[in-house]
């Protein structure tokens, strides 16, 4: 299986990599945004293989991610990779969505922010939790 990988690249280079590798039939199997939210860095692993229709977004704040999520889920897409960096009030998101039915999600992983509060993904993103049928935690 052919693959491509990189890390420590700025958003502009990540977009150029996206344009190049997606045009050649590669798909992301790993995606990370990290570092300072004012100047985030990206890492990704791509493999050349077939799969369902997909879409990706990067460099957006929580509102931008929510908008993309809402639009994509209405078109039958669901997130398969999600990454974020920064404080909760200025986080930067990157995500990959695939078309299809993900079925119910079996767990609700914990989410915490640097301010010390913690919760679950279902509480952090209630609209997404409802769409993905995540179990809610009290």
Image (tube, rainbow, N blue to C red):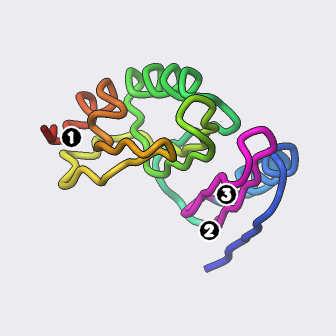
Direction bottom: furthest residue: 1
Q: Which residue is mark 3?
A: 25
Res 92 → quadrant: top right
| Upstream in sequence: badge 1 or badge 2 | 2
Residue at left 81%, top 44%? 39
In this figure, which residue is indicated by the disc labeled 2? Answer: 47
Instruction: Give x and y (percent) for residue 30.
Output: 57, 63
How many numbered discs? 3
Q: Residues within 10 Å of mark 2 (few under 14, many from 20)?
A: some
Kindly state the secondary structure of the residue where label 1 is placed: loop
Q: Quarter of the image containing the C terminus?
A: top left
**If the image is split into quadrants, where does the N terminus sit?**
bottom right
Marks 2/3: CA distance? 8 Å
Q: Magenta span covers which residues?
A: 27-48
* Residue position marked by numbered label 1 in the rendering: 134
Q: CA distance from mark 3 to mark 1?
A: 31 Å
Q: Earlier in the sequence, mark 2 or mark 3?
A: 3
């Amino acid at each position: 299986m052919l693959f491509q990988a990189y890390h420590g690249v700025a958003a502009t280079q990540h977009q150029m990599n996206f344009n190049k590798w997606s045009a050649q039939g590669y798909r992301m199997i790993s995606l990370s945004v990290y570092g300072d939210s004012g100047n985030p860095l990206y890492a990704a692993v791509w493999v050349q293989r077939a799969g369902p229709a997909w879409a990706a977004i990067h460099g957006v704040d929580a509102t931008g991610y929510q908008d993309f999520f809402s639009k994509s889920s209405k078109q039958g897409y669901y997130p398969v990779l999600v990454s974020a960096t920064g404080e909760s009030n200025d986080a930067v998101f990157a995500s990959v969505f695939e078309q299809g039915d993900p079925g119910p999600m079996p767990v609700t992983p914990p989410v915490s922010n640097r301010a010390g509060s913690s919760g679950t993904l279902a509480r952090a993103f209630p609209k997404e939790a409802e769409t993905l049928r995540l179990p809610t935690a009290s």
